[in-house]
Amino acid sequence: MEDCIAKIKQARTLLAAAMAGCDTPQIEAMLKNADLELHWALWNLGEPVSLHPELEK
């Protein structure tokens, strides 16, 4: 389980980097949606996460 959690956190970090360099609103929205899904995956795994994932960056 710890490995899964670490990979999800790594994926969120990669998504944040992709969003930072994105200049296409539609792609940025899709990346934000993917990040939100990963945020809730962590929450469902019992990881302490904010109720507002956009504030975690």
Image: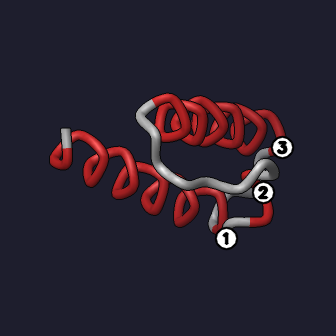
The quarter in which the N terminus is drawn is top left
Q: For the residues carrying marks 3 and 1, which lies nearer the camera in this image?
A: 1
Q: What's the residue at 41%, 34% (across, down)?
A: 45
Find disc 1 in the rendering and name its residue.
Answer: 57
In this picture, is 37 found above or below 13? above
User: Dot 2: within a 10 Å radius of its alpha carbon, few (fewer than 14), some, or many (20 or more) residues?
Assistant: few
Residue drawn 73% across and 52% down? 53
Q: Quadrant of residue 29?
A: top right
Q: Give the amino acid at mark 3.
A: Pro
Can you give x and y, in whole percent of width and height, for residue 57 in the image?
Answer: 67, 70
Mark 1 surroundings: few (<14), some (14-19) or many (≥20) residues within 10 A: few
Q: Residues within 10 Å of mark 3 (few under 14, many from 20)?
A: few
* Residue holding disc 3: 25
Under mark 1, the amino acid is Lys
Residue 55: image quadrant is: bottom right
Is disc 3 placed on a helix, strand or loop? helix
Q: Which disc, if any, is residue 54?
A: 2
Is the C-beta separation of discs 2 and 1 under 8 Å?
Answer: yes
State yes or no: discs 3 and 1 in contact (Cβ < 8 Å): no
Residue 19 spot, x, y in % from top left: 64, 57
How far is disc 3 from disc 1 in space, using C-alphas?
19 Å
